[in-house]
Image: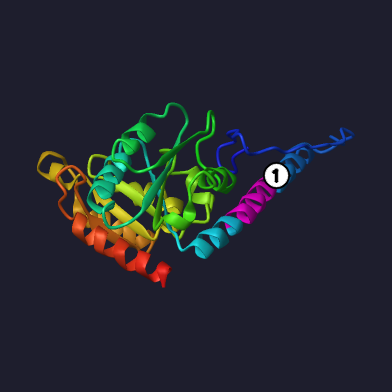
């Protein structure tokens, strides 16, 4: 069960045994007990995930792999951004990608076409990746032969905010076709992210989007967030993103 939306994912297995001798002498008793059980389940889910995330983080540190968790709503251009990034950097860095989607391996096929190894995770009814899934997928790569591991999460600006995957940073991708108030509508995600890619800036002449207002809202939610304005289609602004990546990869490699 997802802590936010109640979805079921393949790696969540919880067995609950509850007595049924509840007293209903007060109207709020059943609701209070149900809320208490809900909180207990949510705490168990996140605690379990965080243990797996800590294991992942230790493994990535040991192997010297820089790991990013890319998050966004559907249609922001995450996969296109990955394709562009890999096409421009795969001759400099040894890269791999973990793709998360509810169904299909379409995005993994797109990544594989760049020559970079990709592993697909299908979550079914689940709306996010968790650390257990990512740990298993990472086992399929030779981490000693990697510099950069990019995780493309399921398109969703709610649930992935709560789940640490063991990554170094969450990177939220927001496109100018979505609306500049997304950071205020989904503050948990933008607060959890260290980096924001404002994508599809090549479309600014054709859409009603206030860039400065968007940047102000993002910084209101997350004052320290690093923002890059990019077009993954034309390549505009991508060099600054690549320079940031180069600095972080070098720091992880020591």
Residue 224 visible within the image: no
Residue 231 visible within the image: yes
Q: Is residue 216 left or right of residue 52?
A: left
Query: For residue 229, what is the image quadrant?
Result: bottom left
Q: Nearer the viewer, residue 20 or 190?
A: 190
Q: Nearer the viewer, residue 85 or 12?
A: 85
Which residue is tagged 1?
41
Prevalent SS, magenta region: helix
Q: Secondary structure at mark 1?
A: helix
Residue 10: % across, % down: 61, 34
Residue 251: % across, % down: 39, 71
Q: Is residue 180 left or right of residue 204?
A: right
Q: Mark 1: give few (<14), some (14-19) or many (20+) Cα within 10 Å.
A: some
Q: Is residue 82 magenta?
A: no
Question: Which quarter shows the N terminus?
Answer: top right
Residue at far right of view: 21
Q: Which residue range is magenta in the image?
A: 41-53
Residue 237: % across, % down: 18, 55
Q: Nearer the viewer, residue 154 or 3?
A: 154
Residue at coordinates 69% horizontally, 42% vertically from top-left?
A: 38
Q: Is residue 45 magenta?
A: yes
Q: Is residue 13 left or right of residue 202?
A: right
């Amino acid at each position: 069960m997802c802590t936010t939306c109640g979805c079921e994912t393949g790696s969540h297995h919880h067995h609950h045994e509850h007595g049924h001798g509840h007293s209903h002498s007060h109207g709020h008793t059943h609701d209070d007990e149900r809320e208490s059980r809900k909180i207990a389940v949510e705490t168990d889910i996140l605690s379990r995930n965080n243990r797996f995330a800590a294991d992942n983080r230790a493994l990535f540190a040991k192997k010297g792999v820089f790991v990013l968790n890319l998050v966004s709503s559907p249609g922001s251009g995450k996969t296109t951004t990955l394709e562009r990034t890999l096409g421009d950097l795969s001759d400099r860095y040894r890269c791999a990608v973990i793709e998360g989607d509810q169904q299909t391996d379409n995005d993994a096929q797109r990544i594989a076409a760049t020559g970079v190894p990709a592993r697909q995770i299908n979550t079914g009814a689940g709306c996010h990746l968790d650390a257990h899934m990512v740990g298993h997928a990472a086992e399929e790569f030779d981490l000693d032969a990697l510099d950069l591991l990019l995780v493309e999460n399921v398109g969703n600006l709610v649930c992935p905010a709560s789940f640490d995957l063991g990554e170094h940073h969450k990177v939220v991708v927001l496109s100018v076709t979505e609306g500049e108030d997304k950071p205020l509508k989904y503050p948990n995600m933008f607060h959890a992210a260290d980096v924001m890619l404002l994508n599809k800036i090549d479309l600014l002449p054709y859409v009603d989007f206030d860039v400065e207002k968007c940047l102000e809202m993002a910084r209101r939610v997350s004052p320290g967030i690093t923002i890059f304005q990019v077009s993954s289609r034309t390549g505009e602004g991508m060099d600054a993103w690549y320079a940031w990546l180069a600095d972080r990869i070098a720091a992880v490699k020591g």
